[in-house]
Amino acid sequence: MLANSSAPALAGRRLLLGVSGSIAAYKAAPLTRLLVQAGAEVQVILTESAAAFVTPLTLGTLSKKPVLTSFLRDAASGQWHNHVELGLWAEAYVIAPASANTLGQLANGLCPNLLSAVYLSARCPVFLAPAMDLDMYAHPAVQQNIQRLRSFGNHVFDSPAGELASGLSGPGRMLEPEQIVAELTAFFSNK
């Protein structure tokens, strides 16, 4: 139902979905599915650590595009994924989940992987859905990184409270896929 109501706003939109290493990476599958159902063209970028939680095959099948996991397409021929072209292609870059490590990289201009290099090249709006354990989320360094990313003009979703993978309860959960789609729909509806 949500996908149909978001169709006019997201139909034909070119979206990058960055997935970083967090147990919440499993939510990237339903998020990809909902975005595609809403008519968006979705290109997934998966970090090496995220691939331990969700496979490129799963996300590639749902997005109907090969998932990008590194700079190189073919090391023997020197073919590579151009982070600048990806950053220019996208109308929005959604990073969900955004782990504490990824937030730190982005807030400090570090780019050890394709996901963060594309972030530094992106000219489009960026949406971040933090996901980590309670104490990590509450740590002053993480909160400072979140504030810094917001000061750069990024849209950082608040992390809802609830049960976490550790068994603790509190903020740190990734925003649910349906809520992320609703936020993107509202953003593009106002364009």
Image (tube, rainbow, N blue to C red):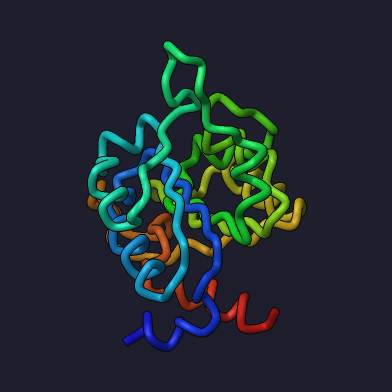
Say if 34 sits above or below 42 in the image. Answer: below
Residue 158 visible in the current orientation: yes
Which residue is nearer to you in this view: 112 or 71? 71
Which residue is nearer to you in this view: 135 or 149? 149
Q: Position of residue 84 (x, y in %)?
A: 67, 38
How many labels, in total?
0
Query: Which residue: 37% across, 42% down?
Result: 67
The C terminus lies in which quarter of the figure?
bottom right
Query: Which residue: 58% across, 36% down?
Result: 116
Query: Which residue: 62% across, 50% down?
Result: 146
Left or right: where 10 falls relative to 19: right
Which residue is nearer to you in this view: 10 or 115? 10
Q: Quadrant of residue 156?
A: bottom right
Q: Position of residue 85 (x, y in %)?
A: 64, 41
Of all residues shown, which one is farthest toward the front? 77
The N terminus lies in which quarter of the figure?
bottom left
Query: Which residue: 58% across, 59% down?
Result: 127
Q: Position of residue 122 (x, y in %)?
A: 68, 47
Which residue is nearer to you in this view: 5 or 136? 5
Left or right: where 145 falls relative to 34: right
Residue 135 visible in the current orientation: no
Of all residues shown, which one is farthest toward the top? 76
Q: Quadrant of residue 53?
A: top left
Q: Position of residue 113 (x, y in %)?
A: 52, 28
Say if 81 sits above or below 30 in the image. Answer: above
